[in-house]
Image: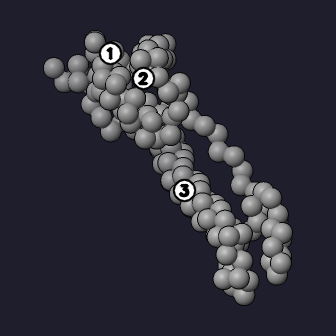
């Protein structure tokens, strides 16, 4: 935490709003998955769905089945994709240090696609984190942590 209470308030509010935004995108993704599933079922089984109104919107191809009214497509703002460095920093906030291969697994769980080739992605992780020595510390053998946490540990010694 900083020594300025205003900065602390801003950071806390940012974290609070980020949690809401993350939840929003999670809910929208689930909604769109359900909507697509219902739409597929409507196309395959129109008789079952003809009298049911779920209040869902159409998929990109408007509904052409008899008895079903086409509704506008739900428009969701695109979420900016977090960078490798941002995701890695977020992961390392809850970990002491991680080898790049373990970090890769957690990055993929958070939605980072990379190249799909583990060897290339591990080199990419090392390269990216190595270019940000003000944030990341290399413990050696491709094991990474946050510089701030490393400095705190050094000061305690």
Labelled disc at residue 85: none
Q: Earlier in the sequence, mark 1 or mark 3?
A: 3
Choose the circle earlier in sequence order: 2 or 3. 3
Residue 26's label in the rendered image is: 3
State the residue at coordinates (81%, 73%): 65
Figure quadrant of residue 26: bottom right
Placement of 60 over or under 2, stated as above or below: below
Measuring 76% from the left and 66% from the top, which residue is drawn there?
58
Query: Which class describes the residues within 10 Å of circle 3: few (<14), some (14-19), or many (20+)?
Result: few
Asked if residue 61 shows in the view, the reply is yes
Closer to the camera, 152 or 142? 142
Badge 3 marks a residue whose secondary structure is: helix
Colour scheme employed for the rendering of this structure: one colour
Residue that numbered label 2 is attached to: 118
Query: In which image quadrant can residue 41 be found?
Result: bottom right
Rounded to the nearest angstrom, the CA distance separating label 1 from label 3 is 32 Å
* Label located before the other in sequence (1 or 2): 2
Q: Is residue 53 left or right of residue 116?
A: right
Q: Residue at x 32, y 29 (%)?
A: 102
Q: Secondary structure at mark 1?
A: loop
Question: Would residue 151 appear left or right of 12 to someone viewing this image?
Answer: left
Residue most toward the bottom?
51
Residue 118 is situated, as x and y percent measured from the top left of the image, at 42, 23
Quarter in which the N terminus is drawn: top left
| Disc 2 secondary structure class | helix
> Percent x, y for residue 40?
66, 65
Instruction: Determine the image quadrant of residue 150.
Output: top left
Q: Which mark is residue 142?
A: 1
Distance from the alpha carbon under mark 2 to that under mark 3: 27 Å
Image location of residue 89, percent across then percent down = 43, 31
Q: Are marks 1 and 3 in contact (CB under 8 Å)?
A: no
- Which is nearer the eye, 89 or 122? 122
């Amino acid at each position: 935490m900083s020594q300025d209470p205003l900065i602390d308030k801003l950071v806390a509010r940012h974290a609070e709003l980020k949690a809401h935004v993350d939840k929003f995108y999670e809910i929208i993704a689930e909604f769109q998955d359900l909507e697509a599933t219902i739409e597929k079922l409507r196309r395959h089984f129109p008789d079952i769905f003809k009298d049911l109104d779920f209040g869902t919107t159409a998929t990109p191809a408007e509904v052409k089945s008899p008895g079903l009214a086409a509704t506008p497509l739900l428009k969701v703002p695109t979420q900016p994709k977090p960078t490798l460095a941002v995701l890695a920093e977020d992961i390392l906030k809850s970990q002491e240090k991680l080898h790049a291969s373990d970090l890769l697994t957690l990055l993929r769980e958070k939605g980072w696609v990379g190249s799909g080739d583990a060897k290339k992605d591990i080199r990419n992780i090392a390269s990216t984190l190595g270019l940000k020595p003000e944030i990341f510390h290399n413990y050696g053998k491709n094991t990474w942590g946050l510089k701030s946490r490393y400095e705190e540990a050094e000061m305690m010694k």
